[in-house]
Image (cartoon, rainbow, N blue to C red):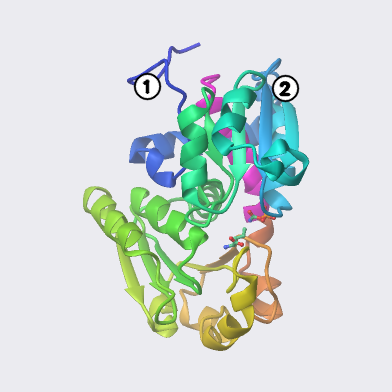
Amino acid sequence: MPGPRYDLPDMARNFLSVDDLSASELAELLELSEKVKTSPSDYAQRLAGLSVAMIFEKPSTRTRVSFEVAIAEVGAHPLALSSSELQLGRGETIEDTGRVLSRYVDAIVLRTFGQERLEALARTATVPVVNALSDFEHPCQCLADLLTINEKKGRLARLTVAYVGDGNNVAHSLLLGGAKAGMHLRVATPFGYEPIPQVIRRAEEIGKDTGGSAMITHDPEQAVTGADVLYTDVWASMGQEEEATERTLVFQPYRLDEFAVERAAKDAIVMHCLPAHRGQEITDGVIDGPQSVVWDQAENRLHTQKALLLWLLREV
Ligand code: CP
Ligand code: NVA
């Protein structure tokens, strides 16, 4: 087994942001994901005897189930915990939760609101902490997205990805991960719903090294024209339920419909992290159409998360 790969071997390596990975580490992780997907039995007992706790402060279908199955399929024991069942729901701090869980488990996966909660957990946990979605990023989703694009297109670098909709957590991770993979990102949002400037600047900076780029526009047609990948996500994310009605009005032009697919490259693929709000950000015809890869994309959460845990726990 190779030794620790980090400069500070006594520190737990976390995955709070796509930006926690260098471009070469991201490529390495995607390569491992392919191996794990092709030969799952080779990895079946790699994490035998370990336990992984997952804490959900927001609902989840894909992340919860794919992590639970992924953990079990590499031989470890998953604990899926909702914050309402924990003392966390009664006021115990995330820091103290991190201190205590680190005495029992080998990694902690957290879905939460503010990114600062993940950072607080990572400061006190002595085991790796994984961001299973925050308001700021959804890095595990990005791994599956990139694996899927690579499978369908045979490469990542120089492809154009058009993301149409809200400049949210999924858009942030796609900007950072896509730029690391040398892709050209075009993000079309309504005024006032752009990705945060810090993420845009960081994606541009990454692109200078990798040949990737990030372009933000308010014109969805400009974004989708000739694109190799079309991507969208819900208009109102978890925690924004009160804004849903207003957002439904503002976001009307920012959907993946038959017109958008028509404007994209002939062999463009259509992606959505799911859950989809059919008839809002994506039409039935597009999500169920021949160019949609959303179910393969959802499956790839399983394979990339297995690879992520193997990599974080240094069992590869
Ligand atoms: N894409 C995704 O993270 O889905 P869930 O919210 O169901 O986990
Ligand atoms: N942006 C969405 C992603 C769901 C997987 C949300 O945060 O609700």
Q: Which residue is mark 1?
A: 6
Q: Residue furthest front?
A: 91
Q: Amino acid at mark 2?
A: Gly
Q: Would you place residue 287 above or below residue 304 in this image?
A: below
Residue 48 found in image quarter? top right
2 and 1 marks in contact (CB < 8 Å): no
Q: Circle 2 sits on which residue?
A: 75
On screen, 259 above or below 231?
below
Q: Is 158 drawn above or below residue 56 in the view shown?
A: below
Viewer-side residue, 166 vs 295: 166
Looking at the rendered structure, the secondary structure element under dot 1 is: loop
Write down the region rendered in magenta: 297-316
Disc 2/disc 1 C-alpha distance (Å):
24 Å
Residue located farthest toward the left when viewing the structure as drawn: 208
- Residue 31 in view, yes or no: no
Horizontally, residue 160 falls left or right of residue 309, namely left
x, y (%) of residue 233? 57, 68
Q: Position of residue 38 (x, y in %)?
A: 64, 35
